[in-house]
Amino acid sequence: MSTGGPIQPRPTRNERRDAAREKARLLREEQKKRDRRNRLLIQGGVVVAILAVAGLVIGLVLQSTQPAGPGPANMASDGILLVGGENGIEAVATPAIADGGEPTPTQPDESGTVANIVTYIDYLCPYCGQFETTNNETMRTMVESGAATLEVHPIAILTNKSAGTQYSLRAANAAACVAEYSPEAFFDFNGLMFENQPEELSAGLSNDEIKDIAAEAGASSSVDSCIDDMRFKGWVQAATDRALTGPIPNSELDAVTGTPTVLVNGKQYVGSLEDTAEFQAFVLQAAGESYSESNGTPTPTPTPTPAAG
């Protein structure tokens, strides 16, 4: 006994053909819908990508055209001026260079009785290390006694010579931080940075190591966040550009072409970087010439002071 329903008649050939055509039509319609959705998604993605690239380009342009930001206090000339004081070496207080502002050249002592020493240094430069470690104590004695002033310009021309860590830039920024927050510690900080100078092409000192040096020099802990934040990065880059394009104030130099660049009363020192006596003689000669020019007398012949043993 059969339990199934009634037997359906077999579709005719025309019915099967019409069903196949309808199925094909439905598939084509569905494919058109998918294609339309994909085009909209692709177009939307292209627009988003274009907007993202445009945003990146605009951001880079704005970043490159932003002002360097205010410089550190006590570096209105792009350098810190150190003089002898009751408590040893002191920094001359100056306001910071304003956003987009220009440095104010230091007015040198023109009495002819004081040597105005100006240095442009890069903390990774090995030749700067030779000059600074050789003449650090000589310059300390001269400044403390009032025989000389010292103006230090930290710049960063070797930023790409430290295995990607930008040590020159970080070190010059740290010097600016010390000038801002602990200017009385600057001379010692500067000397210690060269005593602990890393080799060129190495990664250089870490920020923590630089902060330890600042603390050893007597700087306050306020410099720590300034060093980590690279607060004066823009100023370092701007000051470096100014030094490399010139002119150099109070001298006949068109620009700094290498470090160290050492000037005494506007005259460039080109002698040995490792001979204290030669540098002392040059300082005396430059000061003597300035004295003669200011008094209208012949230039005295300097007597070099023997180098300390």
Image (spheres, rainbow, N blue to C red):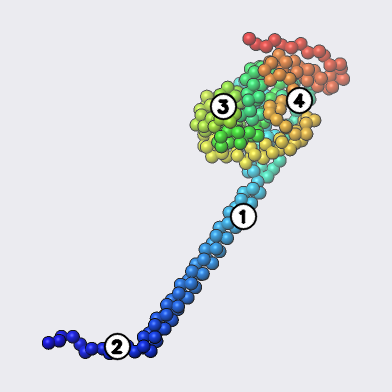
N-term-proximal mark, 2 vs 1: 2
Q: Secondary structure at mark 3?
A: loop
Residue type at tag 4: Gln
From the image, tell me which residue sits under label 2. Answer: 10
From the image, tell me which residue sits under label 3. Answer: 198
Q: What whole-number distance in Å separates the C-alpha atoms at marks 2 and 1?
A: 71 Å
In percent of the image, x 57 and y 60: which residue is there? 50
**Camera sees residue 140:** no
On screen, residue 146 above or below 174: above
From the image, tell me which residue sits under label 1. Answer: 58
N-term-proximal mark, 4 vs 3: 3
Determine crowd level at label 4: few under 14, some 14-19, many 20+ residues with C-alpha closer than 10 A. some
Residue type at tag 3: Pro
From the image, tell me which residue sits under label 4. Answer: 268
Q: What whole-number distance in Å separates the C-alpha atoms at marks 2 and 3?
A: 93 Å
Res 19 → quadrant: bottom left
Q: Secondary structure at mark 2?
A: loop
Residue type at tag 2: Arg
